[in-house]
Image: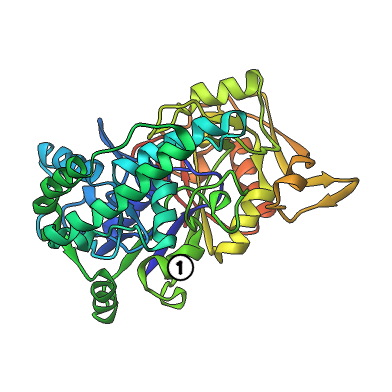
Amino acid sequence: MNICVVGLQWGDEGKGKVVDILAERSDVVVRYGGGSNAGHTVVIGDSRFALHLLPSGSIRQDVTCVIANAVVLDPEVLIGEIDGLAERGISLDGRFFISENAHVVLDYHKWEDQLREEALGKRKIGTTIRGIGPCYADKVGRSYAVRVGDFRDPDALKDKLRVILAYKNKLFSALYQAEPMDAEAIFEKCRSYAPRLVPFTTDTTELLHTAIGQGKSVLFEGAQGSLLDLDHGTFPFVTSSNSSSLGLPSGCGVPARMVDKYIGVIKAYTTRVGAGPFPTEQDNEVGDFIREAGNEYGTTTGRPRRCGWFDGVAAAYGVKIGSIDALVLLHLDTLTGLEELKVCRAYEIDGQEKTFFPANIDRLARAKPIYETLPGWDDDLTGISSFDDLPAHARDYVRRIEEIVGKPVEMVGVGPKRSQTIVRA
């Protein structure tokens, strides 16, 4: 079975844990989009792995891992992750492949990202300053793009970087009065990256079609969340790629019909990082409680996440655009101790009740959540391994989310570890 795992909210849903669990029954795990602005966390026993580019399945030694075409790859970050796993006894030799067509994030992308955000002032988008947006912009522009396959020919790459930096430096000087960057220094960095990355480089589209043709099980891993999708999210407060399952076919060259099951990951509440409308946000003691109980701080940036009640309208939208078959609900244990819980089942917008999420931020900013109130629980859930053993109010909460979102919850997370996952029959 080929499976796609995607987040249905504004990211940080816990996809890394889900992919790690499902990777046990998969032959290949594919990261099909995004860049090092994504943070996927896997907890095994007392060990915690924070990954930004490597697929979450890389922790399992018998799984082949692929970074596909639409990923924008920061060589420094990736090499650091490869070395970090090696130091912990996990080797990627012979089982890790990078698309030769993946675009490369270099220092001038990060510098451009920072300059642009600073210039926007109060209107800034709130990027991670990882150079992701500028790299995708160069990809679309084509003329000034660098891909992983370019590392195979140092002389041609050196000439290309000379042209690119001549253009970028004029841009930086004219728009931001910034000092020029040194093309030679950036080339030397690339030359040091090449021997580390080129051996992993291949045509990953051919690799994936060969694997599927051989009957192997492929697990596709989304980055960020569906509400951050460039075309279908809360633009402009989105990421620079198609982070919903809609990005899978273009991201790795595998048609959507070849995927047997789409799994959507949600939290038992809602979080968001950075600016943008957030109808169910609780900028109060409830939000503070959720943030501390759930350790809601960014894996990539460490920034505190905005926290609020579960938004069923938003999650149902992710289900609809992503053709989701089943749900994984995580962080149920985080809500322990709250006397009452609220779930948003609809919005009121301009006096009308709406159950379809308005991705247009002007309408979303006017949305007032229509809540249902459910009783909470005080029981510690972290040691529970059966759904029937959960407190009655916790079971009712999960079932009500299923009804609002319209899909079954097949797994429930009651802690960060692999073992703290309840699989429903």
Residue at x-position 60% and y-position 52%: 233
Secondary structure category for the residue under label 1: strand
- Please name whichever residue, 16 or 24, is drawn nearer the observer in this view of the structure: 16
Residue farthest to the top?
285
Q: Position of residue 24 (x, y in %)?
A: 27, 56
Which quadrant of the figure contains the N terminus? bottom left
Position of 330 with respect to 198 (left or right) is right
Image check: 296 left or right of 309? left
Residue 17 visible within the image: no
Q: Looking at the picture, how far across and down is residue 308, in whole percent? A: 63, 32
Q: Would you say residue 363 is visible in this rendering?
A: yes
Query: Does 118 appear above or below 363?
Result: above
Disc 1 designates what residue?
A: 261
Image height of 14 relative to 296, above or below: below
The residue located at (57%, 39%) in the rendering is 268
Q: Residue at x 21, y 51 (%)?
A: 60
Badge 1 density bin: few <14, some 14–19, many ≥20, Cα 10 Å: some
Left or right of 188 on screen, residue 259:
right
Q: Tell which of 135 and 67 is nearer to you.
A: 135
Q: Position of residue 371 (x, y in %)?
A: 77, 38
Q: Residue at x 65, y 35 (%)?
A: 309
| Direction right: furthest residue | 351
Question: Residue 277, percent across and down?
Answer: 67, 38
Q: Quadrant of residue 182?
A: top left
User: Disc 1 marks which amino acid?
Assistant: Lys
